[in-house]
Image (cartoon, grey):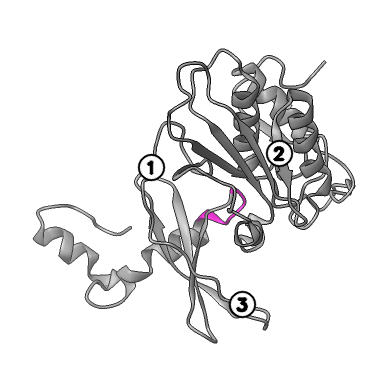
C-alpha cells in the first residue's frame, strides 16, 4: 500500500510518491527525466527530452478552449540530497523512504525534495485529468535548479508558444508572486569565507539568512533550515541593537522614552 494514499489531492500525492521512488538529486536526473517521458508516452502526449534531461510535454486545450493562449507550467525535477549522519541510504541510487502523520510528509533520515517534486506531481496530475477545462498546456520540467539554474539556462524555448508562465516553486499555496528582483550567482572557491550577516523576515513570517562573502562581498540569501541553531539566528537578528544608534546597554532608557518597560534581567 502506498504511504501517501490517504492524502488529498490523491493523484498529486500518488505522483509525488512515484517521483520520490527514484533518485533525483542535482546532476543525477536521467531516471526521473525518463519517468516524465514515460508518462507522456503513456498519455499519448507530445514531448521533447533534451540532452541535459529537461523535458517538455504538450497537451492540447480542452473542448471549447482551443483558441485560448497557451499557458506554461514549470517546475524542476532535481532535489537537494541531504541525510543524517546515521543514514546508510545511497541517495545516488535509491529513492526516498516517505513518512506521514496525515498532516505532514517527510522522508526518513533524508531531505524530502518537496522543492520542487510537489510541483512536478501537480503538473502531471493536471496533464492526466481529462475533466479539467484548460487552454493549451506546455509543461516544462527543468533540471539542476538547485545548483545554479543549469536546466533553465540550457532550455530550448524555440517551440514554446506560451507567453505566460506559472513557476510552481513558491512557498505557500494560493499565493502568486507576479515579479521578483532576480538573483545573482557568485562562485567562491576558498572554504569558510561566507559569513552570516543578517536575518530578514518575509511577509509570510518565514526567516531567511543573508550571507556575505568576505572575499568578493557578494550577498546571498537562503531559507532558514529546520536544523539551524535558533540562538545563533537570534544573535544575528539582534546584532544591529548592539551598535549605534541602538546599543543594547541603553535598551531600558530607549524603552522608557517610548513609555514602555523593558528592564533587562
First in residue order: circle 2 vs circle 1: 2
Q: Quadrant of the N terminus?
A: top right
On the rendered structure, is 121 left or right of 176?
right
The answer for how far apart the CA atoms under marks 2 and 3 are is 34 Å
The spot of residue 246 in percent (x, y) is 24, 71
- Marks 2/1 in contact by CB < 8 Å: the verdict is no
According to the picture, the residue beneath numbered tag 1 turns out to be 204
- Marks 2/3 in contact by CB < 8 Å: the verdict is no
- Classed neighbour count for the residue bearing mark 2: other residues with Cα under 10 Å, few (<14), some (14–19), many (≥20): many
Please tell me whether mark 1 sits on a helix, a strand or a loop. loop
Which one is in front in this view, the residue at disc 3 or the one at disc 1?
3
- Residue plotted at (72% across, 16% down): 5
The spot of residue 101 in percent (x, y) is 66, 22
Q: What is the span of residues highlighted in magenta in the rendered image?
A: 226-230
- Classed neighbour count for the residue bearing mark 3: other residues with Cα under 10 Å, few (<14), some (14–19), many (≥20): few
Give whichever of 103, 242 is nearer the camera. Answer: 103
First in residue order: circle 2 vs circle 3: 2
According to the picture, the residue beneath numbered tag 3 turns out to be 187
- Residue plotted at (48% across, 59% down): 233
First in residue order: circle 3 vs circle 1: 3
Which one is in front in this view, the residue at disc 2 or the one at disc 1?
2
Q: Which mark is residue 167?
A: none
The spot of residue 169 in percent (x, y) is 53, 44
Please tell me whether mark 3 sits on a helix, a strand or a loop. loop
- Residue plotted at (77% across, 58% down): 27
- Residue plotted at (49% across, 18% down): 133
According to the picture, the residue beneath numbered tag 2 turns out to be 47
Give whichever of 138, 238 is nearer the camera. Answer: 138
Amino acid at each position: 500500500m502506498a504511504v501517501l494514499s490517504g492524502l488529498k489531492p490523491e493523484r498529486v500525492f500518488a505522483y509525488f510518491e512515484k517521483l520520490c521512488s527514484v533518485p533525483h538529486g542535482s546532476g543525477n536526473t536521467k531516471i526521473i527525466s525518463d519517468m516524465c517521458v514515460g508518462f507522456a508516452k503513456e498519455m499519448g502526449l507530445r514531448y521533447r527530452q533534451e540532452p541535459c534531461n529537461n523535458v517538455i510535454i504538450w497537451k492540447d486545450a480542452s473542448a471549447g478552449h482551443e483558441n485560448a493562449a497557451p499557458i506554461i507550467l514549470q517546475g524542476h525535477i532535481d532535489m537537494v540530497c541531504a541525510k543524517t549522519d546515521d543514514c546508510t541510504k545511497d541517495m545516488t541510487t535509491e529513492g526516498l523512504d516517505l513518512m506521514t502523520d496525515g498532516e505532514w510528509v517527510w522522508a526518513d533520515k533524508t531531505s524530502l525534495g518537496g522543492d520542487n517534486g510537489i510541483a512536478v506531481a501537480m503538473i502531471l496530475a493536471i496533464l492526466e485529468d481529462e475533466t479539467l477545462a484548460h487552454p493549451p498546456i506546455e509543461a516544462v520540467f527543468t533540471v539542476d535548479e538547485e545548483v545554479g539554474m543549469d536546466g533553465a539556462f540550457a532550455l530550448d524555448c524555440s517551440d514554446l508558444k506560451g507567453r505566460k508562465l506559472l513557476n510552481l516553486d513558491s512557498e505557500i499555496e494560493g499565493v502568486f508572486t507576479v515579479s521578483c528582483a532576480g538573483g545573482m550567482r557568485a562562485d567562491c572557491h576558498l572554504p569558510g569565507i561566507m559569513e552570516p550577516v543578517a536575518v530578514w523576515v518575509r511577509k509570510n513570517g518565514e526567516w531567511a539568512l543573508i550571507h556575505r562573502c568576505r572575499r568578493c562581498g557578494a550577498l546571498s540569501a537562503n531559507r532558514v533550515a529546520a536544523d539551524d541553531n535558533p540562538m545563533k539566528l537570534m544573535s544575528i537578528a539582534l546584532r544591529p541593537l548592539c551598535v549605534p544608534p541602538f546599543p543594547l546597554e541603553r535598551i531600558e532608557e530607549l524603552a522608557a522614552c517610548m513609555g514602555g518597560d523593558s528592564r533587562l534581567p
